[in-house]
Amino acid sequence: MNKATILVFISFLIGCAPIPHAAKIEPEISGQILFNGFPANGAEVTQCISHNGNKCTKHRSVLTDNNGRFKLKARREFRWYVTLLGDEMFAYGFSVVYNGVSYQGCSGSDLGVLENVSDVKYELTSKNECNLSLGW
């Protein structure tokens, strides 16, 4: 190959692949927290954003409004690269503290491009975890 062909090929790759970029690593999650069927006003919805093994080392939290509604904004991370072969697997979720009691919360995973998750309903008095998996 000559130098012109290599230059055109590299220009094409740089133009098609957003390198560097801000990758979406957690979707926006919104919904409602309920306690015995009623809105859980003032519940703390917490999302772990940094792990060390199985232990959460950094998190962010939001409080539910009068209707038990919450919104965790999407989280992005700066990356120097783009995965060109295969799709990346993402795991995400939240836990809840209400009236001093901790609840398991919801978790999910997705493959590839993350779509926002809306209208999650999580009943604190239910033993079941609400699964947020979007579909892979």
Image (cartoon, rainbow, N blue to C red):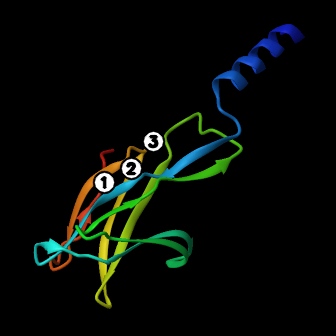
- The residue lying furthest to the front in this view is 66
Residue type, label 2: Asp
Extreme-right residue of the structure: 3
Assign the C terminus to one quadrant of the image: top left
Q: Specify whether 108 is left or right of 52.
A: left
**Label 2: element kind:** strand
Q: Is residue 44 left or right of residue 2?
A: left
Q: Mark number for residue 112?
A: 3
Q: Specify the quadrant that holds the N terminus.
A: top right
Residue 49's x, y, as percent?
53, 67
Q: In the displayed structure, would residue 80 be above or below residue 14?
A: below
Please report whichever mark, 1 or 2, sits nearer to the chain's N-terminal start: 2
Residue 61 drawn at (x, y percent): 45, 72
Q: Which mark is residue 15?
A: none
Question: Dot 1 lies on which element?
Answer: loop
SS at badge 3: loop
Tell me if label 1 and label 2 are in contact, CB under 8 Å. yes
User: Image point 63% across, 38% down: which residue?
Assistant: 82
User: Mark 3 is on which residue type?
Assistant: Gly
Q: Which residue is mark 2?
A: 110
Viewer can see residue 2: no
* Residue positioned 69% across, 22% down in the render: 15
User: Within 10 angstroms of label 2, few (less than 14), some, or many (20 or more) residues?
Assistant: many
Q: Position of residue 4 (x, y in %)?
A: 86, 8
Q: Which residue matches tag 1? A: 133
Q: Badge 1: how crowded within 10 Å, few (<14), some, or many (20+)?
A: some
The answer to whether marks 3 and 2 mark residues whose Cβ atoms lie closer than 8 Å is yes
Q: CA distance from mark 3 to mark 1?
A: 13 Å
Tell me if I can see residue 122 in this picture: yes
Q: Are marks 3 and 1 in contact (CB under 8 Å)?
A: no
Separation of marks 3 and 2 at Cα, in angstroms: 7 Å
